[in-house]
């Protein structure tokens, strides 16, 4: 039995409406019905949304609501909602509030007992996740990494032992730096999927150990252009019994000249293994020697 009916727009209601992340054919009929029927559309960029509405022959009043004005413009929209207007909230692409404006407005609506109706639809993070081939029963959305190297590396260190699959958005001009920092902090073997230009003509999804992925991206400038999502395999504790003889010999040599933590980090980088596993192995060896004495 079909569930589709022409949408009956409710007064004094905020509709959260996803829009396509690339392919205009991905918009839902319900989204079109809402956008064509509400009193007002609050848009992140009215010019961008205007083109979308023009494509679908929708005439609607637009209201600019973005990161720089949401704090004070939201009160205007709350007043309109209380006066009986219906409003649709959209972002430039995908589901509003997912790394886009709207949180402050929705929070005010909840505080004022104004009804909020969310529509399902496009989201780059979930679209990429579905094609990554990584565990999706538990995952952690992290948005954009910090722009500065130190802050970015600090975040990556905090996430180093996070067992859930990680989802990041990344920009064209910071992709190489972010991948390089992942290699530096996590080592070259952490598996990462780069999903680029999803649903668009030049869509590309490629996964590899992050060291290989970095080299692949560097090899062709086109591979770092467009809208991008990074899906990262969660941390897996490495079995110490699987450490190679070569990595253990390197560790033993470095321990003669360096502190244990530094020796483990360098040996891990040389052989592409987890530094924590090498560190634990060395600690276990030290403990065993102390007990024998």
Image (tube, helix red, strand yellow):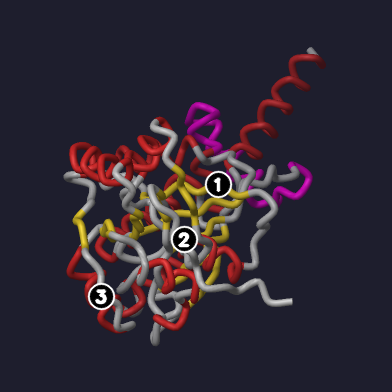
Eyeballing the image, is 5 above or below 10? below
Left or right: residue 64 compared with residue 187: left
Label 3, residues with CA under 10 Å away: few <14, some 14-19, many ≥20: few
Left or right: residue 242 compared with residue 123: right
- Say which residue appears at 39% left-offset and 87% top-offset: 201
Name the one closer to the observer, 256 or 4: 4
- Say which residue appears at 25% left-offset and 58% top-offset: 44
If you read the primary sequence from the N terminus, does the residue marked by circle 3 or circle 2 appear first?
A: 3
Tell me the quarter of the image containing the C terminus: top right
Q: Are marks 3 and 2 in contact (CB under 8 Å)?
A: no
- Say which residue appears at 41% left-offset and 49% top-offset: 13
Residue 60 is a magenta residue: no
**What span is in magenta?**
240-264
Tell me the quarter of the image containing the N terminus: bottom right
- Give residue 274's quadrant in the image: top right
**Residue 140: assigned label:** 1
**Residue 191: assigned label:** none
Q: CA distance from mark 1 to mark 2?
A: 12 Å
Q: Nearer the viewer, mark 1 or mark 2?
A: 1
Q: In the image, residue 169 lies at what x, y percent? A: 40, 57
Which residue bears the numbered disc 3? 59
Which residue bears the numbered disc 2? 230
């Amino acid at each position: 039995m079909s569930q589709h009916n022409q949408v009956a727009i409710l007064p004094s209601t905020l509709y959260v409406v996803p829009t396509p992340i690339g392919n205009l054919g991905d918009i839902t009929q319900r989204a079109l019905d809402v956008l064509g029927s509400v009193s007002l559309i609050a848009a992140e960029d009215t010019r961008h949304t205007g083109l979308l509405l023009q494509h679908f022959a929708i005439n609607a009043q637009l209201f600019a609501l973005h990161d720089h004005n949401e704090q004070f413009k939201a009160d205007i929209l709350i007043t309109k909602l209380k006066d009986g207007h219906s409003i649709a909230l959209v972002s430039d692409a995908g589901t509003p509030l997912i790394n886009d404006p709207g949180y402050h407005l929705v929070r005010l609506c909840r505080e004022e007992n104004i009804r909020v109706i969310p529509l399902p639809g496009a989201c780059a993070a979930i679209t990429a996740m579905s094609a990554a081939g990584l565990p999706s029963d538990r995952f952690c959305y992290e948005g954009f990494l910090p722009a500065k190297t130190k802050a970015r590396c600090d975040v990556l260190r905090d996430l180093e032992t996070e067992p859930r699959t990680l989802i990041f958005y990344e920009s064209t001009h910071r992709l190489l730096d972010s991948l390089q920092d992942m290699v530096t902090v996590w080592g070259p073997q952490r598996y990462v999927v780069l999903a680029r230009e999803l649903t668009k003509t030049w869509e590309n999804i490629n996964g590899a150990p992050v060291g290989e992925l970095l080299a692949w991206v560097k090899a062709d400038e086109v591979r770092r252009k467009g809208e991008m999502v990074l899906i990262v395999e969660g941390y897996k504790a490495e079995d110490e019994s699987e450490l190679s003889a070569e990595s253990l010999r390197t560790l033993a040599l470095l321990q003669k000249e360096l502190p244990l933590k530094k020796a483990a980090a360098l040996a891990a980088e040389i052989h592409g293994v987890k530094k924590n596993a090498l560190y634990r192995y060395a600690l276990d060896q030290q403990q065993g020697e102390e007990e024998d004495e």
